[in-house]
Amino acid sequence: MAPVAIKRILISESVDACCKKILQENGIEVTEKQNMTKDELIGDIENYDGLVVRSATKVTAEVINAGCNLKIIGRAGTGVDNVDVPAATKNGVIVMNTPSGNTISAAELTCALIMSLSRHVPQADMSMKAGKWDRKKFMGAELYGKVLGIVGLGRIGKEVATRMQSFGMRTIGYDPITPVEVSASWGVEQMSLEQLWPQCDYITVHTPLMPSTTGLLNDKSFAQCKKGVKVVNCARGGIIDEAALLRALESGQCGGAGLDVFVEEPPKERSLVNHPNVISCPHLGASTREAQARCGQDIALQIVDMVKGTALVGAVNAQVLASTFSPESQQWIRLGEAMGAVLRACTSSKQPYSQVQVNTTGACLKKSTGFLGSAVVVGLLSSGSGNGPNLVNALTLAKETGLEVVMKHEEGGAGDSAACVCVEVCVNGATSRARGSVQAQVPVLEQLEGSVFRQPVALAGHLLFFKANASPQLLPAVTGALASAGVEMESFSAPAVRGGDQWYCVGMSSPMGDVGSLKSVVKEAAQITV
């Protein structure tokens, strides 16, 4: 992908100092403002290209819409619950997090809570501080031989499993994404939730918070568990239904809970926090010096890599960009955008579009169909004013405007010379077509509306496309019209076939003020700048 211009970044929370240092060393101006109100952030965000947050700053749609120059939102931590990702995507803003920055710290806290639940360590400590010596009250249980159910087998779930296995625990788990054979390689037997609940002595959750995981542990699932099961949540508040958990604790169905996260933080409803069988923490999963340094460093390096166009790591809403980080990809992206712009210009009187079909041919483009489809849509929908579409939001905007995007790929020949892109745009039942490729690192247009250019059109600079019937007077007339407008002709591409109406292309020194002056000479005319 082409480098993204990031000049100024706002850090709105306490992030490790290495983050600011790395960004500044790479030429990015950094401003730190902590404890900003919502209105202060909305009023100030327009001055920045990027925003770095942890979990306290709520990056709402209102904030994102106010960030007219915003290109990147970086979350120094795991998850992006505090960022309105759909709003960011619609505005073409990349959202990224640091998926591995706090993995070890969160896993270690989970293990600490499991051990504390098994031996009542916090409660015993408070009893001692109260001057008591009550050994019988805090009778615990060994972890050895017990069953630990891990819901969510990503990075953190894996680290919890390997650590608790060292205590002799049997680890079972559930994850809809991680392959069974992968989790088995690190000692976790996967099964359905219905099979998992009744077997567990301890349950820990490590999933993102989404509709499918909200209230995952509820009255129904608690009823399926062993009586006295102990649960831990160091992931996201809401995965365990807090009201259901309180009922399970009161009835004894749940024997204890270790909670680092809550639906509301800090929690105003204190029933769980004050329960004698609950060990609670103020969201400390990532609160270690090592995790904060790692997250701060990771988000800074990820932003720098993106700015330099070398890699894209941790992006949660820009998967289409993952395969665009090579010089070759950038040329094909430019081709797609330019072909979309050509078809937009040449069909401007026939809008709106109903469908665009992007067909790629050639083995070298097998993994490029996705970003090429987005690139064509960028060119097709760009108006040339304000913040137009980009690769991040192109498909979202297409859907909103009712434009169906169809992408297909054919293997074709093995060499790069066989690679090409064909685009078809449907407008009011009529179809317009174009074909292009990259030749000698230059995007070129080979065919437009059935007109095959004798010399492919280099898609760069100021281009005038016009449709006319070939005649000896055509070129002198067009040249005269350009001269009258003070424009020089720099190149000329004619169709290979001379019969009937055909498309021509002229490279110009500057755009014409008004292509209407060509109406007496040609049937259709449009100009673009690439």
Image (cartoon, helix red, strand yellow):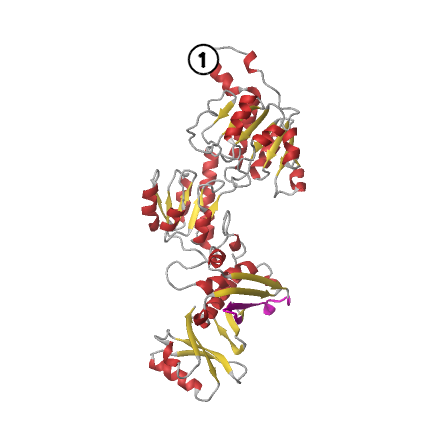
Q: Position of residue 437 (x, y in %)?
A: 54, 69
Graded by Cα atoms within 10 Å as few (under 14), some (14 to 19) or many (20 or more), the crowding at tag 1 reads few
Judging depth in this view, the residue of 174 and 116 nearest the camera is 174
Residue 116 visible in this rendered orientation of the protein: no
Q: Position of residue 332 (x, y in %)?
A: 52, 64
User: Does residue 229 belong to the magenta stretch?
Assistant: no
Residue 249 visible in this rendered orientation of the protein: yes
Quarter where residue 513 is shown: bottom left
Q: Is residue 356 above or below residue 302?
A: below
Q: Is residue 520 above or below residue 357?
A: below
Which residue corresponds to the image point at 48% horizontal and 36% vertical from the top-left? 291
Q: How many marks?
A: 1
Q: Magenta span covers which residues?
A: 412-434
Query: Split into 4 quadrants, where in the image is the C terminus?
Result: bottom left
Quarter where residue 506 is shown: bottom left
Q: Is residue 323 above or below residue 112?
A: below
Q: Amino acid at mark 1?
A: Ala
Left or right position of 244 against 269:
right
Q: Residue furthest bottom?
A: 472
Judging depth in this view, the residue of 331 and 517 nearest the camera is 517
Q: What secondary structure is marked by label 1?
A: loop
Judging depth in this view, the residue of 57 and 34 nearest the camera is 57
Q: Position of residue 247 (x, y in %)?
A: 53, 25
Quarter where residue 482 is shown: bottom left
- Label 1: which residue? 130
Q: Position of residue 444 (x, y in %)?
A: 51, 71
Judging depth in this view, the residue of 307 and 111 nearest the camera is 111
